[in-house]
Amino acid sequence: MLLRTRLHGKQYEFPDVRVLMGKANEEKSGDRLAGLAAETAAERAAARFVLAELPLWVLREQPAVPYEQDEVTRVIQDALDPVAYAELKDWSVGQLREWLLADTTTAAQISRAADGLTAEMISAVTKLMSNLDLIYAASKVRVSAHCNNTIGLAGRLSSRNQPNHPTDSLTGIRAELYEGLAYGSGDSVIGINPVDDSYSSVARLLEMTHAVIQQWQIPTQNCVLAHVTTQMKCLAAGAPAGLLFQSLAGSQRGNDSFGISVALLDEAQRLAQRHCFTPGPNYLYFETGQGSELSADAHHGWDQLTLEARCYGLARRYRPFQVNTVVGFIGPEYLYDARQIQRAGLEDHFMGKLSGLPMGVDACYTNHARADQNAIENLAVLLTAAGCNYFMGVPMGDDSMLSYQCTSYHDTAALRQLFGLRPAPEFERWLEDLGLMHAGRLTARAGDPSFFLRR
Amino acid sequence: MPEQPATDPQVSIDLPDPALKRPTLSHPADPAGLHALMAATPARIGVGRAGPRYTTAAQLLFQADHAMTQDTLLREVAPSLLAELALFSVATQVCGGKQEYLLRPDLGRKLSENAKEEIRARCPQRPAVQLVVGDGLSAAAVEANLRQILPVIRHGVLSAGLSFGVPFFVSHCRVGVMNDIGELLQPDVLILLIGERPGLGRAESLSAYMAWRPQAGDTDAQRDVLCNIFAGGTNPLEAGAYIVQLAQTMRAHQASGVALKLAT
Ligand code: B12
């Protein structure tokens, strides 16, 4: 294989696809940590010139981890639609980019083509896209799903109500949940990250959130983001769960370190179909994020963008209700500053959509990264323009348990009003009936958690 | 030079510390109820709104807390505390300060050669329980909790009739360093108390990561964690008792992490 170009009089040569893919990435501290980043900006540009000419079939034949070695690769390759693949396998990566952006290319055509793309191809084209390219192409595609309500329809923006508490206190969580509902947050899910991963504690959180859903007849689903095995135990014992959650990695070794496998996820899905109290048919909730594979030394020498794309390839198998990257969650060793976090947020959202997933984004940062709330507000605006399905809703964006900052209950309300978007239709009706929203805007009553002390 | 104003504008701004928890939401439906809700959580609720945005006071307090957190990030654990608790101190392979620590987690997972020698010289091998303290992402977390939690764990382990290794401190430490320590000392149960990344205006949260016979190649799937240890979360005294109990469970099942979960 020869991968070479001259650029401004200088020769650049890349030994293989893996190295080329790493060097073509936008600057990320995680790729530098892995020793994969381009040495200079010119080398990055050269890598992109070469990558743009690469035929897509080469990427299919060179997955990040060999088929025999890795079940994530097997899931992705086995699910490929041979007809869709045959139509585009001879395109170059640069051609795919232009096709995605072309005015004649429709959403329906993109989702059909998606059946013929592997994660490595999706990652490759993403490297050639500018930020506005990523926003524009993603905005063409809507992916909607149904559980107890409908997420991802055009003209809608949803919010996960994330009422985390440092001791899993039921009264504390309920108080935050009320605050969020009062701002119209909770149509994607009422989803709690528990401190205590034990069965009894998780079951108690499921019971409480379910009771609030029943009491107020809220058209939504609940979820406790414990390890999936804990949730399965809860479901089997009759605890009321609306969605099942798990974090995903883009390699089998990465998933080993998360304590999961394809067989386990298959079983979780079967259990959810049988026991969740919601009608479905989409029962799963996944989170991902660039850097988790490298953090578990499970990246196989590949760049973090490609591994992230592979998470989406795996997620697709389960027809999930929602998927979001938690971009910026891990820390500066993977995404150093506001600029890198913003870039990765746009990349992940685009790649998820191109993988056919109902994508949301947890736009966030940690206190040890060089970012602040302004950066995350900017990213949320960009992603809303890109047609993102949902954001997180956390009291003022400050998660008192996970020690990170993300978007707030207020943010989704502001974004809806700014872009003329509405909550999920069932949930909007519910807000209207309660008098918290009128014609897509918060009413005078909204924003007051004590409103929910009436019943 | 701007012209000197003719008269002193009669404005006097002299503020009390705003870090008090009071609602910035006006006209709640149930004022007493709102207070109770706010008392139930450290989260920023009852903040009210200006249109769909924050009230000014709530927004400024958020920004002030972010500023404070930035300032605490770069601190190191006070040597006097380590001396007081008789912990000797070793380092990982991070040698370029906090900035390198943040960008090179791989180095924070490996003990330096000096550290290995010192640990070998000072610590007996194969204790039932080995305790190690690491700064992690928050020196303040170690300082806020260690005085309380360390004696509880030591006492608990000893009164369960188990041997307690010589505890020590690791600077610029990541969770993955447990493997190196496991190889070196071969404890049955290794407990690593480590500072969690700081939250907004809160940096006191400590975690206990634990593993049964940790060794090279182990991942988080072989570990357990008890997190949010601080006065406002899991109280350090209670946490200490829980940790001892978990150590005994690990010994009983000869497992930790996902394997322990499947066994219990
Ligand atoms: C950052 C983080 C992560 C990152 C870790 C990567 C990284 N490089 O840091 C990612 C996103 C990968 C992650 C994943 C998960 N996490 Co996590 N994570 C955290 C968080 C927010 C901060 C941790 C921290 O400050 N570490 C300190 C620094 C110094 O450590 P470090 O060496 O840099 O990083 C290591 C640890 O963070 C560790 N780690 C992170 N999460 C977990 C979870 C478990 C069970 C274990 C054993 C280790 C572990 O992995 C890193 C690499 O070794 C905590 C919240 C908290 N308050 O502590 C939750 C937290 C520890 N995670 C939690 C959970 C449940 C998970 C998952 C199991 C979620 C899931 N359902 O899949 C996964 C799987 C983790 C695993 N490998 O087994 C829970 C643990 C609850 C419990 N008592 O068991 C916590 C407390 C948050 C919560 N309540 O949901 N997590």
Image: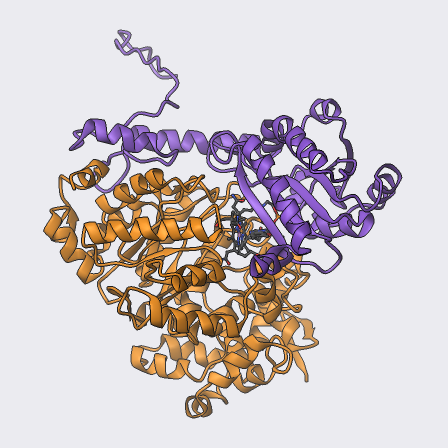
Q: Is residue B257 left or right of residue A414?
A: right
Q: Nearer the viewer, residue B198 or A11?
A: B198
Q: Position of residue B130 (x, y in %)?
A: 74, 42
Chain in purple in the render: B
Q: Is residue A103 left or right of residue A80?
A: left
Q: Quadrant of the N terminus of chain A?
A: bottom right
Q: Can I make out residue B261 in this image?
A: yes
Q: Is residue A242 above or below residue A142?
A: above
Q: Is residue A155 above or below residue A17?
A: above
Q: Position of residue B221 (x, y in %)?
A: 61, 59
Q: Residue at x 17, y 31 (%)?
A: B30
Q: Quadrant of the C terminus of chain A?
A: top left
Q: Colour of chain A?
A: orange
Q: Position of residue A345 (x, y in %)?
A: 44, 58
Q: Nearer the viewer, residue A25 or A358?
A: A358
Please identify the quarter of the rendering in which residue A19 is found. Answer: bottom right
Q: Residue at x 51, y 70 (%)?
A: A264
Q: Can I make out residue A131 in this image?
A: no
